[in-house]
Amino acid sequence: MPPFHRSRAPIDALNYEIVQEQAAALGRLGRGLEAALKELREFDAAHPQWDASCEGRQARRMLLTAASHALWMFVVQREACGLRESRSLMRDYGVPAEVQERMGVFP
């Protein structure tokens, strides 16, 4: 083990803080994705043939947009942390293809 250098202690502390914040942000964004996907699934379950009215389409479109935006933010944060593979993410979170296709698309 290399000898401890006092001059390195501040940079090590800073790096530790950065990694902690990255992990916390990843957790927050993951929970946000889970919540957005849950809302979309609950809407779809409550409206199997979702309301063809303008209000029903708009409500679902808003949920779909929220879920795809949450996915985009989570994927970007994962990539910033060095986690580049997202196939398992899509499988583990049960992200519908419809949400994946709209990831990163802004109205």
Image (cartoon, rainbow, N blue to C red):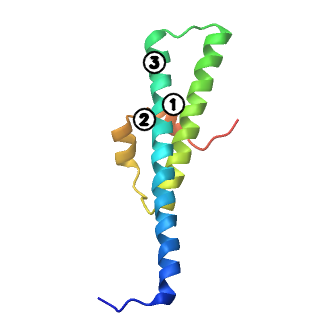
Q: Secondary structure at mark 1?
A: helix
User: What residue do we see at 51% from left, 61% from top?
Assistant: 80
Horizontally, is 42 left or right of 73 in the view? left
> Is 33 or 101 nearer to us in this picture?
33
* Count of labels in the image: 3
Query: Which of pointers 2 and 3 indicates the residue nearer the eye?
Result: 3
> Is 24 or 9 nearer to us in this picture?
9
User: What residue do we see at 48% from left, 31% from top?
Assistant: 35
Q: Secondary structure at mark 3?
A: helix
Q: Earlier in the sequence, mark 2 or mark 3?
A: 3
Q: Which residue is mark 2?
A: 95
Task: Tell me the quarter of the picture where residue 66 sits.
Answer: top right
- Residue 25, compared with residue 30, is above or below; it is below
Disc 2 residue type (three-letter): Val
Residue 42 circle label: 3
Crowdedness of circle 1 by 10 Å Cα count: few (<14), some, many (20+)? many
Q: Position of residue 84 (x, y in %)?
A: 43, 58
User: What residue do we see at 61% from left, 23% from top?
Assistant: 61
Crowdedness of circle 2 by 10 Å Cα count: few (<14), some, many (20+)? some
Q: Which residue is mark 1?
A: 36
User: What residue do we see at 57% from left, 8% from top?
Assistant: 51
Q: Secondary structure at mark 2?
A: loop
Horizontally, is 1 left or right of 90 in the view? left
Q: Position of residue 21 (x, y in %)?
A: 51, 58
Q: Position of residue 94 (x, y in %)?
A: 37, 34
